[in-house]
Amino acid sequence: MSTLTVPAESPSPLEDANKLHQAFKGFCCDKGEVISVLAHRDATQRALIQQEYKTTYTEDLMERLSADLSGDFKKAVLLWMHDPAVRDATILREALSGFIDMQAVIEVICSRAPSQIQQLKQVYHSKFCDLEQDIESKAPGVLKELLHAYITKTRYEGPEVDQMLAEKDAAGLFDAGEKEWGTDKKPFIQIFSERSRPQLAATNLMYHSMYGNSLKRAIKKETSGNFQIALLTILRCAENPSKYFAKVLYKAMKGLGTDEKTLTRIVVTRTEIDMECIKAEYQKKHGKTLFDAIHSDTSGYYRTFLLSLLGPDQ
């Protein structure tokens, strides 16, 4: 469920474009007005505002925002202005350029549905290059094999589950991992890249039933590094994606420092999808609202913007 609060009778795109133009005038940008408009418009409305701004003022709204905003606030707003597929492609391109951020790559690829991956691949190819080529050149070893398989294999997106296949897959994963010393990673790559989310969740239950151990624990025991993280991400998103994102958000704010890049990425990308569920999972696990956690770990207009997307405290 989305947490985006859009007025029942939103102003026209032209009215919003005019408000933003007025906010940019003068010595200092009225950042509060920018938030009041953009943090309360859905993806379609934001696209129309950009078109109207370009038509009316012969200026690119993204360029103006980039020039007038700064820091984490600027990064969050610019990411928010993209439609989902362009946003995912942009995140991946940045993560695969310069200083490689495999956490972001794994999170985006391994948490998205097959249809979403197909869309972002098309956008990635049109805006940058071929995603498969970037994965091939930037991802290491066995992780490369898993990510490549995950973005190229066709997976069913329906709810039906084959229990016989779940039993077969559970046995195959046990034989490849816990049964003997050493791990055969090929069955893990094949099963995790080819099965639907409900099917993989059924395999997880079957594994526990057959061997008295969770598949997560087996993955932690038999694999390591980013390959392990990717497998766990796929499995956790098959079971409960909202719980997975709540966990990543907690880690981003745990301890003294805050991982603003991860915080921004998840809040912005999940607001219009399942942020209400993420908020519920966060409070259930940590006994503290996500609103309070972000409020205490951020400041200024960046905090105001994220909390506006997050919606009212629970």
Image: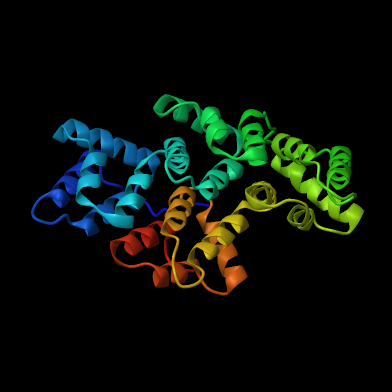
Residue extending farthest bottom: 287
Q: How is the image coloured?
A: rainbow
Residue sitting at x 61%, y 43%: 110
Judging depth in this view, the residue of 103 and 191 nearest the camera is 103
* Position in image of residue 134 (x %, y %): 51, 32
Q: Is residue 282 visible?
A: yes
Judging depth in this view, the residue of 234 and 134 nearest the camera is 134
Compared with 197, 276 (above or below) is below
* Position in image of residue 177 (x %, y %): 83, 48
Quadrant of residue 21 within the rendered picture:
top left
* Position in image of residue 146 (x %, y %): 66, 38
Residue sitting at x 79%, y 38%: 187
- Left or right of 278: which side holds 296? left
Residue sitting at x 17%, y 44%: 18
- Left or right of 157: which side holds 270? left
- Marks counted in the figure total 0
Judging depth in this view, the residue of 108 and 113 nearest the camera is 108
Residue sitting at x 62%, y 52%: 241
Quadrant of residue 259 within the rendered picture:
bottom left
Q: Is residue 40 visible?
A: no
- Left or right of 62: which side holds 137? right
* Position in image of residue 249 (x %, y %): 52, 61
- Left or right of 50: which side holds 284? right
Compared with 297, 87 (above or below) is above
